[in-house]
Amino acid sequence: MRLALELAPDVILMDVRMPELDGIEATRQIVAAGSAARVLVLTTFDVDEYVHAAIRAGASGFLLKDVRPLDLVEGIRLVANGNALLGPTVTRRLLERFADEQPPGQFAGAVATLTEREREILRLLAGGLSNAELAERLFLSETTVKTHVSNVLRKLGVRDRVQAVIAAYDAGLVRPGSGRD
């Protein structure tokens, strides 16, 4: 924790189970302390509760330790660039769980403040589209898309795309299968 604040890394690889403080609580404390570091949880435990807790604590990604080395390096780069990352099986289970939860939750009010274009961007983000794919789909420049995505994150009060997608599901804006046409 101390080193995260002193060294200001771009990305922190965090394990869930650690001797003195578990990785979920460490992530929560790092985020609460105002660190700009992105946290990528890397664990052997493919347990839904860990995934959900890590994301709610502010993690930007969650991968299993059986990930191929090149995929891990790419994942670190993605998270460092402000993107979010979840392993494929994690993504499917996460979306199913949020789809089953009670509709509109804590993000309903924030989603209501988005412009129609921002809601459209958020719906497409929930479908997993990259900025380049959003730009192509909406006939916008990537710079314009990045501006819209930044505005969405700011208005929702979230750190990254994963949390924005959770907000979209939480507010009932999207359901599994509705994000990508």
Image: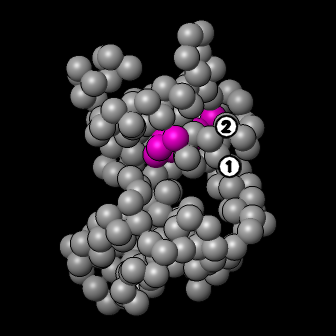
Does the segment drawn in magenta span residue 61? yes
Q: Between tags 2 and 1, which lies in front?
A: 2
Q: How many marks?
A: 2
Kind of residue at disc 2? Tyr
Q: State yes or no: discs 2 and 1 in contact (Cβ < 8 Å).
A: no
Q: How far across and how far down the image is residue 153, in percent?
A: 36, 64
Q: Which residues are magenta?
A: 57-64
Q: How far across and how far down the image is residue 102, in percent?
A: 74, 68
Q: How is the image coloured?
A: one colour
Q: Quadrant of residue 46?
A: top right
Quarter of the picture containing the N terminus is top left
Query: Which label belongs to residue 50?
Result: 2
Q: Looking at this view, is 18 or 91 the one in front?
A: 18
Image check: 139 left or right of 110? left
Image check: 28 left or right of 83? right
Residue at the image position 67 percent from the left and 37 percent from the top: 50
Q: Looking at this view, is 98 or 180 the one in front?
A: 98
Residue at the image position 70 percent from the left and 62 percent from the top: 98
Q: Which residue is mark 1?
A: 90
